[in-house]
Amino acid sequence: MDTPTTPLRNSNKRSAPTENDTPLTKKQQQDPIIHVGYHFMRTVEAFILPSVLIEKGLIRANELDDDINYSDFENQCWYAYGKLIEMSSCVDRRLDAGASAASEVGKLVSTLQQGSSSAKSIDTSGIKTNIPTWWSILSPESPPIPKTKTARGFNNDITGQLLCPVALNWGDPEIKQKLREGTATIDGRLVNGGDWHNFLYAIPYDPSMPWVGVFQGPLLVKAFRHVFTSPSSAQVDENVTDTGSSTRSGNAQLHGMTKVTTGSIAYIATQVSFALSSNTTFSRNTRSLDSVTFYNSIIAYLRDPENALETKELLKWWDKRIFRCEDTAIHGNGNGSRNAIKAARLAAAAAAAAQRAT
């Protein structure tokens, strides 16, 4: 499980950032921080602005009181801040420079935001466009997902079923109508983004074991491959990895990513939810399909220490499907033939030495 770091910098006080919204020059667009912004948003934190989490992180890094009780939001910022420092030495150096020049931190957060926004826009467009094709591959006998986004969501029986909260029955006409009207309730409260959808599950939801199959839905695997491996890899069977037909390096390879993260699962789940919906922007305005609450609820679950065992197994499941990561205790380390040759050479050398000695 990707665990939080403790990025303390008490010896070098750093200044909190100020937002810089000036357009980036061509030179700035080639800045490696842009690429950090791409990868950070996809794998660590998708919705908290870099300016906010860096400001919160800098303040907390310089706190001398260890007994402060922080909110869930502050802890989420702290986690993301630590991962950002860990991800790039360029960020660390620029924050150090910003200790004496706040404008440097302002440029840093502006560039990170540029990268984040660009990557999110690319991914949103790609998943929105390709999800009807993935669905036709996964369920060729099913009616298609509409290509027009406004015809999706609870307006359509297929996307409505996929987006229906697992605690509700889409087959009930009354529930279906209430979901379309935004008046559906669970335990007396209105449905919100924290009520997870059917598409997240690889198997039918079991209320007695709600953790079984969650975040393993086949649409998630296809969307993950589209973003992190290559668009072509999303067209193959979900039980195998990329066929290698793509001539371009995927985002995972470009950023040296070899393990799936909790943030990347939450991000892809949110992108798929948005693609299936009729919403036109990521926002909190549609209560039942609130992308930000949905994302944060997944992050909170996957990073909760009480769920550490389930999360560890889930990440192993994902690593096997995306990166072909196997348990070396069962499958070995891939050095069988090399080790055999090495052992034979050592044995031959030992025999020759013994013969010379006689």
Image: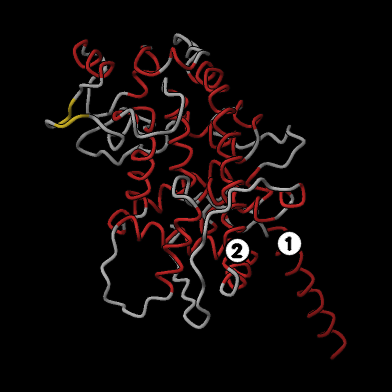
- Mark 1 surroundings within 10 Å by alpha-carbon count, few (fewer than 14), some (14 through 19), many (20 or more): few
Residue 43 appears left or right of 35: left
**Residue closest to the far bottom:** 357
- Quarter of the figure with the N terminus: bottom left
Amino acid beneath label 1: Arg
Q: Secondary structure at mark 1?
A: helix
Which of 258 and 254 lies nearest the eye of the viewer?
254
Against 336, is 12 above or below? below
- Asked if labels 2 and 1 touch by Cβ distance under 8 angstroms, the answer is no
217 sits left or right of 15 in the view: left
Residue 314 higher or lower than 247, as above or below: below
Q: Badge 2 is on which residue? A: 103
Tell me how far mark 1 sits from mark 2, CA to CA: 54 Å
Q: Is residue 264 above or below residue 190?
A: below
Residue 229 location (% of width, % of height): 63, 39
Q: Position of residue 301 (x, y in %)?
A: 32, 48
Looking at the image, is 342 positioned above or below residue 242?
below
Q: Which residue appears farthest toward the right when viewing the image?
A: 356
SS category of the residue bearing label 2 = helix
Q: Three-letter amino acid code at disc 2?
A: Ser
1 or 2: tag closer to the N-terminus? 2
Relative depth, front residue between 42 and 8: 8
Q: Quadrant of residue 94?
A: bottom right
Quarter in which the C terminus is drawn: bottom right
Q: Residue at x 50, y 83 (%)?
A: 11
Q: Is residue 358 visible?
A: no
Single out the mark in the foreground, 1 or 2: 2
Instruction: Please give the name of the residue rendered at 30% of the width and 41% of the height, measured from the top-left corner.
Output: 211
The residue at 55%/65% (across/down) is 86
Instruction: Provide the residue designation for mark 1.
Output: 338
